[in-house]
Amino acid sequence: TQRTLVLLKPDTVRRGLVGEVLGRFEAKGLTLVALELRTIDGAQADRHYAEHVERDFYPPLRDFVTSGPLVALVLEGDEAVEVVRAINGATDGRKAAPGTVRGDHSLSNRENLVHGSDSPESAEREIAIWFPGL
Ligand code: ATP
């Protein structure tokens, strides 16, 4: 079994899509291990997106993820990392396949509703940042 860190970003909360997105993970059979509604500051955003802080798309991304409450959660299940990324769809909502979270609800490359860890190693790093001690 495997764990992964998922964020329902501020656009998901603002648009009232938390239940709709969370329901997809639950319906798939993934187990909820931790969940918290949280508003993060820039320092927490920088820790989470350490690999992106130097990118030119990062400053607006940082503003976006600190713009309001988001939901952070940990899901567990067989191949949870890959399963969650398949449910989320491609990064760019304009290109994500219908049937995925982003494909069904996002028309943006930045405001793309969700985050899912990209590997088991990233998942452990991110879980330690968001839910230390878990
Ligand atoms: P996530 O890590 O959020 O699951 P991802 O792994 O599909 O998404 P990354 O390439 O790690 O995508 O980028 C992290 C986040 O940065 C994206 O989810 C998106 O919000 C934002 N982002 C990535 N590329 C761009 C871009 N070219 N323009 C604007 N925002 C971007």
Image (cartoon, helix red, strand yellow):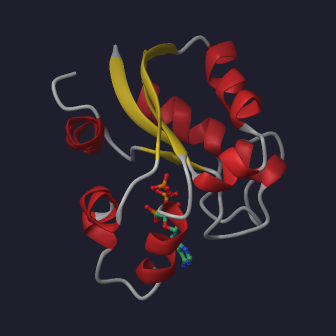
- In the image, is residue 8 above or below residue 47? above
- In the image, is residue 61 above or below residue 31? below
Asked whether, in this view, residue 35 is left or right of residue 15, the answer is left
The residue lying toward the viewer, choosing from 63 and 74, is 63
Residue occupying image coordinates x 72% and y 61% = 93
Asked if residue 134 shows in the view, the reply is yes
Asked if residue 97 shows in the view, the reply is no
Residue 4, position as x, y percentages in the image: 38, 31
Report the quarter where the C terminus lies. top left
Residue occupying image coordinates x 72% and y 43% = 101
- Residue 28 figure quarter: top right
Report the quarter where the N terminus lies. top left
Residue occupying image coordinates x 50% and y 61% = 65
- In the image, is residue 56 above or below residue 101? below
The residue lying toward the viewer, choosing from 85 and 7, is 7
Residue 22, position as x, y percentages in the image: 65, 27
Q: In the orientation shown, which residue stands out farthest toward the left?
A: 133
Asked whether, in this view, residue 97 is left or right of residue 6, the answer is right
Residue occupying image coordinates x 42% and y 78% = 58
- Residue 127 figure quarter: top left
Asked whether, in this view, residue 107 is left or right of residue 89, the answer is right
- In the image, is residue 119 above or below residue 36? below
